[in-house]
Image: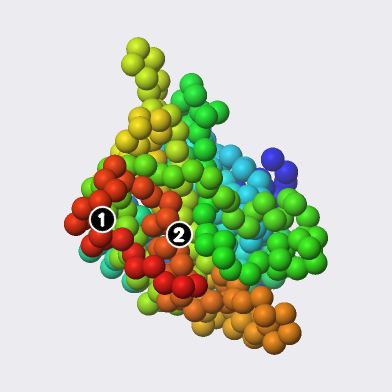
Amino acid sequence: MGQREVSVCKSILRAIFHDYKDKRTLLLRIFAFFTFFQIRLARYREELFKKLRTDIWGLDENEYRESFRSHERKGKLKAMGDLGYSGSTFFSTPNSKFLIKSLPRRSEYTFFCRDLLQPYFDHMVENPNCLLVRITDLLYSPFVTLGGILGLAPPCHIVMENILYGKESDSEGDKWETYDLKPISYFYPERDIAGGNLAPDSVKERLFDKFEDTIRVTENDRIMLLQTLQKDTKILEECNAVDYSLFVVRYPPPTEGHVRHIPSLKSHCSQWRSGVPSVDGKWIYKVVVLDFFWAKHKFQAKAMTGLISAFNLISRKGHMSITTDPDEYRERFLRMVDSLVESDQTTGVAETTSRIPSTTE
């Protein structure tokens, strides 16, 4: 772990373990401004997130806090590198139960804080089976810093559940598969311009994954998934969010006579979050919705929409996933999910009434 990562980790751990006292004196603002890496962070809407953790999701507060400590009882995080196309950096708690993701783009974290957080909270309260990823904390910089301005230290981080928790303890952890799925029918400049040579393969690989299979589950599980995602994406549409993805994890179930230790996070959750077995007995599936921080009404999104609209006057490539309208993105997203999931019933009233109507894209 480099010096930058060490400094960012210290900032995150200080915010988790120490209460921030809001004393924004002139001298403190000046000192804070000239910090580059280890900037001061504070918990945003601390009581709201605590209510989500304890009252809504049933997480143990002491267990949550201790997740940020190593076996030596020292605050510690594990650096996971740059895993996101947006330039976000990731850390994991020592026990791998939670992930910490930076939000370097101001448009993304201001959208979540000002526009989406309260609807997100209300939706979680009203829909206990919700599959939006669980965000357990939001850490932000209450001061303007040179590190934040220069992009050296992210001014905002989210702490969220790690749906891959259990992989490291599984003796067959190398067989776990992950898929970050988005509708592929949109225009992606990195892929669709100049014969696909606009960006290197390392960048194009981060655009989206392809799932070359079908999720085969019971009819009840399929209906539950589609109905849950219809509710979840509706709240995202109402808040103008686009470009979110379906994160799918699958791994082989334990076989008879083969003992495997696969721990799970103790909390209130639906079966699709804890694990749904496939009808053929080959896989266990977990699903959450990720990356719902791109809003059509933010300046950066408006600028990109204008740029792509001008480009389409000549090329007619169509919308990007970040420039399309929220209702259209939701429709394509749900149709993508519908095409991926197959039930053990190919006919019947339940299927005909629950499938998403087919339309021409």
Quarter of the image containing the N terminus?
Answer: top right
Q: Could you tell me the amino acid type at mark 1? A: Glu
Query: Which residue is farthest top?
Result: 257
Q: In the shown orientation, is residue 34 left or right of residue 159? A: right
Report x, y in % for residue 205: 67, 51
* Residue under the image location 54 percent in, 77 percent down: 324
* Residue under the image location 62 percent in, 64 percent down: 104
Q: Which mark is residue 63?
A: none
> Is there CB contact under 8 Å for labels 2 and 1?
no
Report x, y in % for residue 289: 43, 57
* Residue under the image location 46 percent in, 42 percent down: 249
Above or below: residue 166 compared with residue 104: above
The mark lying in front, picked from 2 and 1, is: 1
The secondary structure type at the circle numbered 2 is helix
Relative depth, front residue between 268 and 288:
288
Q: In the shown orientation, is residue 340 left or right of residue 52? A: right
Residue 314, located in which quarter of the rendered image?
bottom right
To which residue does mark 1 refer? 351
Q: State the separation of the CA atoms marked 2 and 1.
A: 16 Å
Report x, y in % for residue 281: 35, 30
The secondary structure type at the circle numbered 1 is helix
To which residue does mark 2 refer? 336
* Residue under the image location 63 percent in, 69 percent down: 187
Above or below: residue 304 compared with residue 182: below
How many numbered circles are shown?
2
Report x, y in % for residue 219: 26, 47
Above or below: residue 111 compared with residue 13: below
Q: Is residue 154 visible?
A: yes
Query: Which residue is farthest left?
Result: 349
